[in-house]
Amino acid sequence: MESKQTFALYVRTFVFGVEDSLVSTVGLLSGVAVAGAARSAIILSGVILIFVEAFSMGIGSVLSEHQAEKYLKRRDVPIAHSLIAGVVMFFSYLIAGLVPLAPYVLMENGSATMLSVALSLLALFCLGIVSAAIFKTKLLRNGLEMLIIGGLAILVGIAVGMLVDGGLIGTLSSAG
């Protein structure tokens, strides 16, 4: 693989890992918190999600990148680049997941939820700016794009938590 393509692969993998971790983790944590779960359950859920998903995303990255590389080269190729991409994915997901989890470790649920969402949105904006700087695209536009699209995904977790807490899911399951 060319060095420019390799660099792009690693940056793309890093951005994907960070973005997915921030959105998935804050979505889960806020949804569980809004549904009224205990702080210890929120922290446990977050830790489990971060480690399981970091490992899963790392393995998925190795397998998918290796298959894509074999397809592009039309022959069997060493798995080395794919392994490095998998490690990048694992650590980017793992470390980014700590951003939305940290407030729950340090604070009570209500304040922690607000800070977790705010920190995650800020981190998404910064990630957009950093990736734009690396790929030499429009900084503000890319930062806002990442913030808005990631923010919408975060809202899904909060909305589901509110639906469950509001009894809609329980009402639907008892009606059937």
Image (cartoon, rainbow, N blue to C red):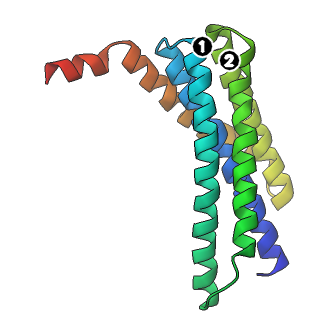
Q: Position of residue 174 (x, y in %)?
A: 18, 18
Neighbourhood count class around disc 2 (C-alpha, 10 Å): few under 14, some 14–19, many 20 upward: many
On the rendered structure, is 61 left or right of 159? right
Who's the residue at 75% across and 31% down the image? 122
What residue is shown with label 1?
Answer: 39
Q: Position of residue 5 (x, y in %)?
A: 77, 74
Who's the residue at 38% across and 19% down the image? 164
Q: Which of the two labelled residues, at mark 2 and mark 1, occupies the earlier sequence position?
A: 1
Up-down relation of residue 48 to residue 110 (above or below): below
Q: Position of residue 138 (x, y in %)?
A: 79, 52
- Judging from the image, what secondary structure is the residue with disc 1 in? helix
Q: Amino acid at mark 1?
A: Arg
Up-down relation of residue 2 to residue 133 (above or below): below
Q: Residue furthest left?
A: 176
Q: Position of residue 129 (x, y in %)?
A: 81, 45
Question: How far apart are the two marked residues, 2 and 1, measured between alpha carbons?
Answer: 7 Å
What residue is shown with label 2?
Answer: 104
Q: Are marks 2 and 1 in contact (CB under 8 Å)?
A: yes
